Image (tube, rainbow, N blue to C red):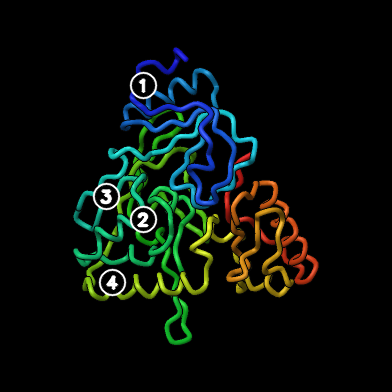
Protein backbone atom coordinates (compact mmCIF):
# COMPACT_ATOMS: atom_id res chain seq x y z
CA UNK A 1 0.00 0.00 0.00
CA UNK A 2 1.96 2.95 -1.33
CA UNK A 3 -0.08 5.52 0.59
CA UNK A 4 1.55 4.25 3.81
CA UNK A 5 5.11 4.76 2.59
CA UNK A 6 7.29 6.92 4.82
CA UNK A 7 5.18 6.61 7.97
CA UNK A 8 7.28 5.59 10.98
CA UNK A 9 4.99 2.94 12.41
CA UNK A 10 4.47 -0.78 12.81
CA UNK A 11 1.61 -1.40 10.37
CA UNK A 12 -0.06 -4.78 10.02
CA UNK A 13 -2.88 -5.87 7.75
CA UNK A 14 -5.67 -8.18 8.92
CA UNK A 15 -4.32 -8.24 12.46
CA UNK A 16 -6.55 -10.40 14.75
CA UNK A 17 -7.85 -8.12 17.48
CA UNK A 18 -8.33 -11.12 19.74
CA UNK A 19 -4.58 -10.73 20.30
CA UNK A 20 -5.09 -7.20 21.63
CA UNK A 21 -8.16 -7.50 23.89
CA UNK A 22 -8.47 -8.89 27.41
CA UNK A 23 -11.52 -10.90 26.21
CA UNK A 24 -9.29 -12.72 23.67
CA UNK A 25 -12.19 -12.29 21.25
CA UNK A 26 -12.39 -10.41 17.96
CA UNK A 27 -11.84 -10.63 14.24
CA UNK A 28 -9.18 -8.76 12.27
CA UNK A 29 -8.55 -5.05 11.91
CA UNK A 30 -8.14 -3.97 8.31
CA UNK A 31 -5.07 -2.05 9.49
CA UNK A 32 -3.43 -2.23 12.92
CA UNK A 33 -1.09 0.71 13.42
CA UNK A 34 1.43 1.45 16.17
CA UNK A 35 2.97 4.89 15.43
CA UNK A 36 6.52 5.52 16.59
CA UNK A 37 5.77 9.01 17.91
CA UNK A 38 3.38 11.97 17.71
CA UNK A 39 4.66 13.08 14.31
CA UNK A 40 4.08 9.63 12.82
CA UNK A 41 0.57 9.62 14.27
CA UNK A 42 -0.15 13.01 12.68
CA UNK A 43 1.08 11.87 9.28
CA UNK A 44 -0.96 8.70 9.41
CA UNK A 45 -4.14 10.53 10.42
CA UNK A 46 -3.69 13.04 7.60
CA UNK A 47 -3.57 10.24 5.05
CA UNK A 48 -6.61 8.56 6.58
CA UNK A 49 -8.54 11.82 6.29
CA UNK A 50 -7.66 12.14 2.61
CA UNK A 51 -8.82 8.59 1.95
CA UNK A 52 -11.82 8.74 4.30
CA UNK A 53 -10.56 5.76 6.27
CA UNK A 54 -12.31 5.33 9.63
CA UNK A 55 -10.05 5.32 12.68
CA UNK A 56 -10.42 3.71 16.11
CA UNK A 57 -8.05 3.76 19.08
CA UNK A 58 -7.25 0.83 21.34
CA UNK A 59 -5.34 0.89 24.60
CA UNK A 60 -5.01 -2.33 26.58
CA UNK A 61 -8.25 -3.58 25.03
CA UNK A 62 -9.66 -4.27 28.49
CA UNK A 63 -13.21 -2.96 28.00
CA UNK A 64 -13.83 -3.81 24.34
CA UNK A 65 -15.80 -6.57 22.64
CA UNK A 66 -14.76 -6.82 18.98
CA UNK A 67 -17.15 -8.47 16.51
CA UNK A 68 -16.18 -11.81 15.03
CA UNK A 69 -15.87 -10.32 11.55
CA UNK A 70 -13.47 -7.65 12.78
CA UNK A 71 -13.59 -3.98 11.88
CA UNK A 72 -12.94 -1.90 8.79
CA UNK A 73 -10.46 0.93 8.68
CA UNK A 74 -7.54 1.52 11.01
CA UNK A 75 -7.08 0.62 14.66
CA UNK A 76 -4.37 2.74 16.31
CA UNK A 77 -2.47 1.56 19.37
CA UNK A 78 -0.20 3.98 21.26
CA UNK A 79 2.12 1.30 22.59
CA UNK A 80 5.43 2.85 21.48
CA UNK A 81 7.73 4.21 24.24
CA UNK A 82 7.07 7.80 23.11
CA UNK A 83 3.47 7.49 24.34
CA UNK A 84 4.32 5.95 27.71
CA UNK A 85 6.62 8.48 29.33
CA UNK A 86 6.31 9.81 32.90
CA UNK A 87 7.51 13.29 33.84
CA UNK A 88 7.29 15.07 37.21
CA UNK A 89 5.65 18.48 37.30
CA UNK A 90 4.76 20.92 40.05
CA UNK A 91 1.45 19.34 41.05
CA UNK A 92 2.17 15.71 40.26
CA UNK A 93 2.90 13.92 37.00
CA UNK A 94 2.55 14.28 33.25
CA UNK A 95 1.88 10.81 31.89
CA UNK A 96 1.71 9.43 28.35
CA UNK A 97 -1.65 8.00 27.37
CA UNK A 98 -0.18 4.64 26.42
CA UNK A 99 1.27 3.94 29.88
CA UNK A 100 -0.24 0.95 31.66
CA UNK A 101 -1.94 1.70 34.96
CA UNK A 102 0.14 -0.85 36.86
CA UNK A 103 3.31 0.93 35.72
CA UNK A 104 1.91 4.26 36.91
CA UNK A 105 1.18 2.79 40.33
CA UNK A 106 4.64 1.20 40.43
CA UNK A 107 6.19 4.61 39.75
CA UNK A 108 4.08 6.47 42.32
CA UNK A 109 4.29 4.04 45.23
CA UNK A 110 7.97 4.35 46.24
CA UNK A 111 7.83 8.14 45.71
CA UNK A 112 4.87 8.64 48.05
CA UNK A 113 2.60 10.02 45.31
CA UNK A 114 -0.99 9.16 46.18
CA UNK A 115 -4.16 8.90 44.13
CA UNK A 116 -3.27 6.37 41.46
CA UNK A 117 -3.26 3.45 43.91
CA UNK A 118 -7.06 3.26 43.70
CA UNK A 119 -6.66 2.11 40.10
CA UNK A 120 -4.90 -1.07 41.26
CA UNK A 121 -5.99 -4.15 39.37
CA UNK A 122 -7.58 -2.28 36.48
CA UNK A 123 -5.89 -3.70 33.35
CA UNK A 124 -5.87 -0.59 31.21
CA UNK A 125 -3.85 2.36 30.00
CA UNK A 126 -3.95 5.97 31.17
CA UNK A 127 -5.76 7.10 28.03
CA UNK A 128 -8.41 4.43 28.30
CA UNK A 129 -8.86 5.03 32.03
CA UNK A 130 -9.44 8.76 31.46
CA UNK A 131 -11.80 8.11 28.55
CA UNK A 132 -13.99 5.89 30.75
CA UNK A 133 -13.27 7.67 34.06
CA UNK A 134 -12.08 4.44 35.63
CA UNK A 135 -12.03 4.06 39.37
CA UNK A 136 -13.41 2.28 42.37
CA UNK A 137 -15.83 2.73 45.26
CA UNK A 138 -14.26 1.90 48.63
CA UNK A 139 -16.15 1.18 51.86
CA UNK A 140 -14.86 2.67 55.12
CA UNK A 141 -16.96 1.92 58.22
CA UNK A 142 -20.30 1.88 56.34
CA UNK A 143 -19.30 4.90 54.31
CA UNK A 144 -18.50 4.65 50.62
CA UNK A 145 -15.89 6.88 49.02
CA UNK A 146 -15.47 7.05 45.25
CA UNK A 147 -12.02 7.33 43.72
CA UNK A 148 -12.15 8.12 39.98
CA UNK A 149 -9.22 9.04 37.80
CA UNK A 150 -11.17 12.08 36.59
CA UNK A 151 -10.75 13.58 40.05
CA UNK A 152 -6.97 13.57 39.53
CA UNK A 153 -6.87 15.06 36.03
CA UNK A 154 -5.55 18.62 35.79
CA UNK A 155 -5.22 18.78 32.02
CA UNK A 156 -5.18 16.67 28.87
CA UNK A 157 -3.25 16.87 25.64
CA UNK A 158 -5.46 15.63 22.83
CA UNK A 159 -5.08 15.27 19.06
CA UNK A 160 -8.14 15.55 16.85
CA UNK A 161 -8.53 13.27 13.85
CA UNK A 162 -7.08 15.94 11.57
CA UNK A 163 -3.83 15.90 13.55
CA UNK A 164 -4.33 19.19 15.42
CA UNK A 165 -3.10 19.16 19.04
CA UNK A 166 -4.67 21.12 21.85
CA UNK A 167 -4.56 21.19 25.63
CA UNK A 168 -7.70 20.98 27.73
CA UNK A 169 -7.47 22.32 31.27
CA UNK A 170 -9.50 21.36 34.32
CA UNK A 171 -12.31 23.91 33.76
CA UNK A 172 -12.83 22.46 30.24
CA UNK A 173 -13.24 18.89 31.51
CA UNK A 174 -16.32 17.09 32.76
CA UNK A 175 -16.36 13.56 34.09
CA UNK A 176 -19.27 11.35 35.05
CA UNK A 177 -19.91 7.79 36.08
CA UNK A 178 -17.89 5.67 33.65
CA UNK A 179 -17.71 8.48 31.12
CA UNK A 180 -15.88 11.66 30.16
CA UNK A 181 -17.24 14.49 28.06
CA UNK A 182 -14.26 14.95 25.77
CA UNK A 183 -14.13 16.16 22.18
CA UNK A 184 -13.51 13.56 19.50
CA UNK A 185 -9.83 12.73 19.24
CA UNK A 186 -6.91 10.78 20.65
CA UNK A 187 -5.61 11.43 24.16
CA UNK A 188 -1.83 11.84 24.03
CA UNK A 189 -0.91 12.77 27.60
CA UNK A 190 -2.53 13.48 30.96
CA UNK A 191 -1.43 15.77 33.78
CA UNK A 192 -2.38 14.27 37.16
CA UNK A 193 -2.65 16.11 40.47
CA UNK A 194 -1.40 13.78 43.21
CA UNK A 195 -1.01 14.12 46.97
CA UNK A 196 1.58 12.99 49.50
CA UNK A 197 1.21 9.70 51.36
CA UNK A 198 3.67 7.24 52.80
CA UNK A 199 4.76 4.43 50.49
CA UNK A 200 3.68 1.91 53.12
CA UNK A 201 0.13 3.28 53.24
CA UNK A 202 -0.08 3.25 49.43
CA UNK A 203 1.22 -0.33 49.39
CA UNK A 204 -1.45 -1.42 51.89
CA UNK A 205 -4.23 0.15 49.82
CA UNK A 206 -2.98 -1.60 46.68
CA UNK A 207 -2.80 -4.93 48.52
CA UNK A 208 -6.32 -4.52 49.90
CA UNK A 209 -7.78 -3.65 46.50
CA UNK A 210 -5.97 -6.51 44.76
CA UNK A 211 -7.13 -8.94 47.43
CA UNK A 212 -10.72 -7.75 47.08
CA UNK A 213 -10.60 -8.11 43.30
CA UNK A 214 -9.24 -11.65 43.52
CA UNK A 215 -12.02 -12.62 45.96
CA UNK A 216 -14.94 -10.98 44.17
CA UNK A 217 -14.08 -10.73 40.47
CA UNK A 218 -13.16 -13.16 37.71
CA UNK A 219 -9.74 -11.61 37.31
CA UNK A 220 -8.04 -14.91 36.40
CA UNK A 221 -10.19 -15.53 33.30
CA UNK A 222 -10.37 -13.58 30.01
CA UNK A 223 -13.08 -10.92 30.24
CA UNK A 224 -13.70 -7.25 29.61
CA UNK A 225 -14.43 -6.41 33.22
CA UNK A 226 -17.91 -5.30 34.22
CA UNK A 227 -20.24 -5.70 31.25
CA UNK A 228 -22.97 -3.30 32.41
CA UNK A 229 -22.99 0.01 34.24
CA UNK A 230 -24.56 0.00 37.68
CA UNK A 231 -28.04 1.56 37.83
CA UNK A 232 -28.40 4.30 40.50
CA UNK A 233 -28.05 2.88 44.01
CA UNK A 234 -27.87 -0.70 42.71
CA UNK A 235 -25.29 -3.15 41.45
CA UNK A 236 -25.78 -4.66 38.03
CA UNK A 237 -24.10 -7.87 39.17
CA UNK A 238 -26.51 -8.29 42.08
CA UNK A 239 -29.50 -7.75 39.79
CA UNK A 240 -28.26 -10.33 37.28
CA UNK A 241 -27.52 -12.75 40.12
CA UNK A 242 -31.08 -12.36 41.47
CA UNK A 243 -32.32 -13.36 38.03
CA UNK A 244 -30.52 -16.68 38.50
CA UNK A 245 -28.03 -16.17 35.68
CA UNK A 246 -24.72 -16.92 37.41
CA UNK A 247 -23.08 -19.68 35.44
CA UNK A 248 -25.34 -19.22 32.38
CA UNK A 249 -23.54 -20.13 29.16
CA UNK A 250 -23.69 -19.57 25.44
CA UNK A 251 -20.93 -21.48 23.72
CA UNK A 252 -17.75 -20.75 25.66
CA UNK A 253 -19.06 -17.44 27.00
CA UNK A 254 -20.19 -17.73 30.62
CA UNK A 255 -21.71 -15.41 33.23
CA UNK A 256 -19.11 -15.66 35.96
CA UNK A 257 -20.20 -17.69 39.02
CA UNK A 258 -18.05 -15.30 41.07
CA UNK A 259 -19.45 -11.96 39.82
CA UNK A 260 -22.55 -11.90 37.63
CA UNK A 261 -21.57 -8.63 35.91
CA UNK A 262 -18.56 -10.41 34.37
CA UNK A 263 -18.87 -12.53 31.26
CA UNK A 264 -15.80 -14.72 30.88
CA UNK A 265 -14.26 -16.52 27.94
CA UNK A 266 -13.84 -20.20 28.82
CA UNK A 267 -11.63 -20.82 25.81
CA UNK A 268 -13.20 -20.37 22.38
CA UNK A 269 -15.98 -17.83 23.02
CA UNK A 270 -17.14 -15.69 20.11
CA UNK A 271 -18.51 -12.18 20.19
CA UNK A 272 -21.96 -13.49 19.18
CA UNK A 273 -21.93 -15.70 22.29
CA UNK A 274 -21.14 -12.77 24.58
CA UNK A 275 -23.80 -10.61 22.93
CA UNK A 276 -26.39 -13.38 23.36
CA UNK A 277 -25.67 -13.55 27.09
CA UNK A 278 -25.82 -9.76 27.34
CA UNK A 279 -29.25 -9.72 25.68
CA UNK A 280 -30.44 -12.47 28.01
CA UNK A 281 -29.24 -10.61 31.10
CA UNK A 282 -30.78 -7.31 30.00
CA UNK A 283 -34.12 -8.96 29.22
CA UNK A 284 -34.19 -10.77 32.58
CA UNK A 285 -33.37 -7.64 34.58
CA UNK A 286 -35.90 -5.60 32.60
CA UNK A 287 -38.63 -8.16 33.23
CA UNK A 288 -37.92 -8.69 36.93
CA UNK A 289 -36.87 -5.20 38.06
CA UNK A 290 -38.13 -2.90 35.27
CA UNK A 291 -34.61 -1.54 34.83
CA UNK A 292 -32.71 -1.14 31.57
CA UNK A 293 -29.06 -2.10 31.92
CA UNK A 294 -26.63 0.00 29.90
CA UNK A 295 -23.46 -1.63 28.54
CA UNK A 296 -20.22 -0.50 30.13
CA UNK A 297 -18.04 -2.26 27.56
CA UNK A 298 -17.55 -0.82 24.09
CA UNK A 299 -18.81 -3.02 21.27
CA UNK A 300 -16.94 -2.79 17.96
CA UNK A 301 -18.75 -4.23 14.97
Residue most extreme to the front: 267
- Rounded to the nearest whole Å, what is the CA distance between mark 4 and mark 2? 15 Å
Q: Position of residue 187 (x, y in %)?
A: 40, 42
Is there a contact, CB below 8 Å, between mark 4 and mark 2?
A: no
Q: Which residue is mark 3?
A: 94
Mark 1 highlights which residue? 7
Q: How far, Cα to Cα, is label 4 from label 3?
A: 22 Å
Which of marks 3 and 2 precedes in the sequence? Answer: 3
Is 92 situated above or below 233? above
| Mark 3, other Cα within 10 Å: few <14 / some 14–19 / many ≥20 | many
Residue at position x 32%, y 65% in the image: 115
Q: Earlier in the sequence, mark 1 or mark 3?
A: 1
Q: Can residue 180 be seen here?
A: no
Mark 2 and mark 1: span between their CA atoms?
A: 28 Å
Q: Position of residue 284 (x, y in %)?
A: 77, 65
Q: Secondary structure at mark 3?
A: strand
SS under mark 1: loop
Q: CA distance from mark 2 to mark 3?
A: 13 Å
Q: Is residue 29 above or below residue 63?
A: above
- Do residues under tags 1 and 3 come within 8 Å of each other at their CB atoms? no
**Marking on residue 197:** none
Precedes in sequence: disc 1 or disc 4: 1
Q: Quadrant of the C terminus?
A: top right
Task: Decide: is 253 above or below 6.
Answer: below
For disc 2, the marked residue is 101
Label 4: which residue? 203
Secondary structure state at the residue bearing disc 2: helix
Q: Which is more N-terminal, label 2 or label 4?
A: 2
Amino acid sequence: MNWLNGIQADIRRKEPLALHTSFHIGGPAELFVQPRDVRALQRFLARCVRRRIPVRVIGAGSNILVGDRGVKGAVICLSAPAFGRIRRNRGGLSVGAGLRLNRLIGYCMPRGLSGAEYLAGIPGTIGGAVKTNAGVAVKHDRRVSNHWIGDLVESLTIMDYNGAIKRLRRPDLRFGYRCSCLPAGIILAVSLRLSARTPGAIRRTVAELMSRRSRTQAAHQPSAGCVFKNPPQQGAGALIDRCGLKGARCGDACVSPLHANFIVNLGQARAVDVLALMRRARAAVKKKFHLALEPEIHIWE
